[in-house]
C-alpha cells in the first residue's frame, strides 16, 4: 500500500532532517485540502485533526469521533484518539507525553505543495499551545514534505509511468485522425472523451487540459481551446496531462500542417524545433543529483537565446507527482516569483518536466514537454521524447 | 451570471462591514483552493495572484501572464494586470493608488470556508508589504466571506433547490426497489450510478456519500457503507447529498424493514421517529433572522433529552451552499470545537440543514435531515420533510 510506504518514508526523512514531530493540522479537508494528506489518508477529515508523525517511529492521529473509523481503517496510525468536544486536551496530552523538541508544520513561502496549513489553523494552534513550552518549538516542515513528495518510491514511479504511457497513447490516437480544418475545441473534446474512457482526471484545470494552440498567437500557455480551425501552414501544440491512480503526467507534443505541395516544414520551423529538441537533450544531460535547478534552466535558456530566439517566459521544468506542478525544487531562473525554489539541490528520484518554448510569430508555438527521473548518474527519460515534428498532410 | 451577481454582492457587503479592500491572495489554486475563489472565477490560478475588491466598486486582478486571458474572459474585473517576474511591484502600485485603510484577508479561526489564505502566503504577503503602511491595515475578511456565502441570491437558491429535488428523486428510486437482504454497499453503488447519470458530484467524500447505516451500530456518521445485508426488523438510514452546477444538497432519509407478520414498526421506533420529526418542526419554527444558532440547537437537543434519549453528538444543523458544510453561523451547541460559530446571528437567506439524531441500540440510527431557508418571518422548507417512516415489506 502506497500510503504505508510513504508513511514509513516520512519517518526516515524526519530523522534525516532532525525534526521530532511532523504535525499535519487540518479540518474540513474537502474544503481545505492539505496537499500532504493524500499521501497519508485516502479519506477526508471533518473536525480539527492532528496527524502526528514522530521521529521515534510512532504515528498518532487525534480526530473527531465521526472520522475515527475511517482513520483506523487506513492502518497508518499506531494510535487513533477520537474526541467529541474539542481537540485541545488530547493534543496537549500527546505533546506532553512525547515531548518533541521541534514541531514541523506545513507552511512554506514558495512551495504550495508544502503549504497546507491555513492561517486560521495556525492561529488556532497558537491558542491551543498558548503558555506551553511547545509554542516556541514550531518550525516549517517544508524540507520534510518536499523530500517526501520528491523522492519517488518504485510504486509511485510505476503509477507516473502508467499515466505517461496513457497520455502518449492519446497523442498517438490524435495523430491518426488529425486533418486540416479541425477545431481546437473539437480536439479538446476528443481528449476529454479518451481521458474519461480511461477513468482518469485532468492533471490540471479541465478548461485548459488539454491546452490546444494552433497557428500564430499572443496568448499564454494556460488558455482554453477555441473554436478556431487549424489551417495549412500552421503549427499545432498540445499541452496535456492526466491523473490516474493519484499520479500525474504532463507532456507537450507538436504537429505541423503541411501546405498543398509542401513535403516538409519551412526551414524556420525546423530550426526552431531542433533548437527546442537540442535544448532538452542538453539540459537532461546535466540533470544530476547535487546540481541546482537554476543551472539546468540556464543551459536551455542560454542555448535558445544563443540561437537568436527570445527566452521562454517560465521555468524550464517542474516536478510532477500527485500534482502536475509538484514538489519544490524547480528548474527555473532566478526570478522573484520563484523565490528559493531554483536553488534547492536536486536529488535522486525526483521527476521533472523539461518544457522550453519558442514562439514563432508566423507559425505558432514551438514547444515540447518531456518527463525525466533523476538517477544517481543522470536523467532517465520517462516519456518517449518527440524526435521529429509530426506532419499532417494537406 | 452567478459570478457577477456574487461579485456585486461582495462590494455591497464590503460597504456594510466597513472594509475597504477584500484581497484574495492565492497561488496554484488547484493544489491550494481558496473556498472563496469559485464565487469569483470558474478557472484556476497558477502564480501568486491578488484578486482585489474595493468598497468603491472597483475590482482589480493581478495575475501571472499565463492566467491573464482566462481572468479577463471572466468579465469580473475592471482591470487585469499581468506580470512575469514577480507580483510585488504591481501589488504595491495598486495599493498606493487606492490607499485602502482596511485590508480584509481570508483567514478565520473557526470557519473553514472563510479560511482560504495559507500561512505561507500570509508570510509572503508580509514580506511584500514590509515597511509599507499597509502591513498594519490587515484584518480578517471573515465577516465579508461569511455574508457572501450565507446570503443566497435567487439564482443560488434555484441551484440548491434543483440539487435537493434530484436527491429526493434518488431516495424515491431506492424506495421502489428496496428489499430485505440488500447490502449497504450495493445501495451505495446504485446511488453513485444515479448520481453519475445526473452529471452530479458527491457533496462530500465519495467513500461516505452516501453514508448507509442499517441495524444496530456503534460507529459514527461518516463511515463507508459495508458488505452487511439489511435484515428484517432493522432500520436503514441514508445520509446523502449531491453537488450540481456548483451547489449542494445534504439530506437523510429512513426506512424500516418489517419482520414477517409485522404491519407496522415497533412502538419504540415510532416514538423515536416522532421525537426526531417533532424536534425538527419545533426548531424550524423558531429559526428566524436575529436568533442565534445555539438557541435553535438547544430546542431540539432539550426536547430529545426530555424524551429520555441521549443528546446527539454533533450540531443540529449547518449551512449548505457551494459546500455541504458551508458558511459560518451554525445551529450548534456551545462546545470548544465550534468556537464562536453557534453565536453568529442568523440572517435572512441562510440555508440550513436540520439533522437531530437518536441511536436505538436494538434497531439502528433514527435520524432525518431536512433543508430550510430562513425568510424574514421564519424558516421555509426546501426539502419535502419525511413525515412517516417508510416501510419495506418482509
Image: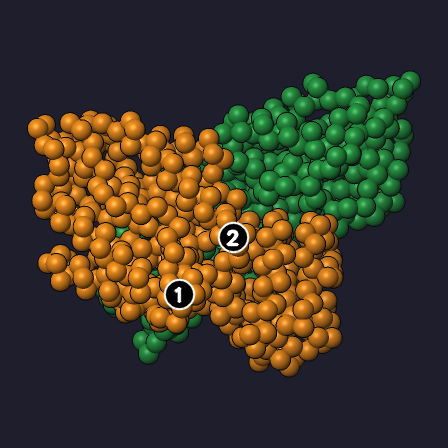
Chain colours: A orange, B green
> A197 or A374: which is nearer to us?
A374
Residue A255 in the image: state x and y as whole percent.
Answer: 22, 38
Q: Is residue A170 above or below residue A369?
A: above
> B371 or B283: which is nearer to us?
B371
Q: Residue at x 14, y 32 (%)?
A: A258
Q: Determine whether, in the image, residue A332 is placed left or right of residue B140.
A: left
Mark 1 sits on what residue? A377
> B299 or A22: which is nearer to us?
A22
Q: Quadrant of the C terminus of chain B?
A: top right
Quick check: can you spot residue B95? Answer: no
Residue A325 in the image: state x and y as whole percent.
Answer: 40, 55
Q: Determine whether, in the image, residue B168 is placed left or right of residue A242.
A: right
> B289 or B57: which is nearer to us?
B57
Q: Is residue A250 above or below residue A36?
A: above
Q: Marks 1/2: CA distance?
A: 20 Å
Q: Is residue A358 above or below residue B235?
A: below
- Of pointers 1 and 2, the one earlier in the residue sequence: 2
- SS at circle 1: loop
Q: Quadrant of residue B261 in the image? A: top right
Q: Quadrant of the N terminus of chain B?
A: top left
Q: Residue at x 42, y 39 (%)?
A: A166
Q: Determine whether, in the image, residue A220 is placed left or right of residue B24.
A: left
Residue A281 in the image: state x and y as whole percent.
Answer: 27, 56
Q: Determine whether, in the image, residue B166 is placed left or right of residue A321.
A: right
Which chain letter matches label 2?
A: A
Looking at the picture, do discs 1 and 2 lie on one chain?
A: yes
Mark 2 sits on what residue? A156
Amino acid at each position: 500500500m502506497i500510503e504505508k510506504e510513504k508513511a514509513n518514508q516520512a519517518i526516515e526523512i524526519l530523522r534525516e532532517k532532525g525534526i521530532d514531530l511532523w504535525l499535519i493540522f487540518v479540518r474540513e479537508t474537502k474544503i481545505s485540502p492539505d496537499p500532504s494528506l493524500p499521501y497519508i489518508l485516502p479519506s477526508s477529515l471533518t473536525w480539527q485533526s492532528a496527524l502526528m508523525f514522530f521521529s521515534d517511529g510512532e504515528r498518532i492521529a487525534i480526530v473527531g469521533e465521526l472520522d475515527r473509523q475511517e482513520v483506523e481503517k487506513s492502518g497508518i496510525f499506531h494510535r487513533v484518539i477520537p474526541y467529541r468536544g474539542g481537540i485541545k486536551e488530547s493534543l496537549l496530552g500527546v505533546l506532553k507525553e512525547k515531548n518533541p523538541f521541534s514541531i514541523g508544520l506545513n507552511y512554506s513561502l514558495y512551495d504550495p505543495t508544502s503549504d497546507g496549513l491555513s492561517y486560521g489553523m495556525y492561529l488556532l494552534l497558537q491558542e491551543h499551545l498558548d503558555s506551553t513550552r511547545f509554542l516556541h518549538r514550531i518550525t516549517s516542515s517544508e524540507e520534510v514534505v518536499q523530500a517526501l513528495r520528491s523522492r519517488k518510491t518504485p510504486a509511485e514511479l510505476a503509477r507516473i509511468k502508467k499515466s505517461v504511457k496513457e497520455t502518449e497513447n492519446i497523442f498517438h490516437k490524435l495523430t491518426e485522425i488529425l486533418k486540416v480544418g479541425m477545431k481546437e475545441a473539437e480536439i479538446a473534446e476528443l481528449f476529454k472523451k479518451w481521458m474519461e474512457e480511461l477513468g482518469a482526471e485532468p492533471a490540471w484545470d479541465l478548461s485548459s487540459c488539454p491546452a490546444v494552440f494552433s497557428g500564430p498567437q499572443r496568448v499564454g500557455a494556460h488558455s482554453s481551446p477555441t473554436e478556431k480551425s487549424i489551417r495549412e501552414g500552421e503549427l499545432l501544440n498540445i499541452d496535456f496531462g492526466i491523473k490516474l491512480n493519484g499520479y500525474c503526467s504532463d507532456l507537450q507534443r507538436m504537429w505541423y500542417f503541411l501546405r498543398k505541395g509542401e513535403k516538409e516544414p519551412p526551414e524556420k520551423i525546423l530550426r526552431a524545433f531542433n533548437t527546442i529538441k537540442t535544448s532538452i537533450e542538453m539540459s537532461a544531460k546535466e540533470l544530476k543529483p547535487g546540481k541546482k535547478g537554476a543551472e539546468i534552466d540556464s543551459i536551455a535558456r542560454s542555448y535558445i537565446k544563443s540561437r537568436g530566439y527570445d527566452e521562454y517566459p517560465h521555468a524550464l521544468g517542474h516536478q510532477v507527482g500527485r500534482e502536475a506542478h509538484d514538489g519544490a525544487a524547480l528548474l527555473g531562473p532566478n526570478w522573484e516569483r520563484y523565490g528559493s525554489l531554483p536553488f534547492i539541490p536536486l536529488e535522486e528520484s525526483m521527476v521533472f518536466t523539461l518544457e522550453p518554448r519558442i514562439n514563432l510569430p508566423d507559425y505558432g508555438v514551438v514547444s515540447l514537454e518531456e518527463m525525466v527521473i533523476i538517477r544517481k548518474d543522470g536523467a532517465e527519460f520517462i516519456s518517449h521524447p518527440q524526435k521529429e515534428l509530426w506532419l499532417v498532410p494537406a
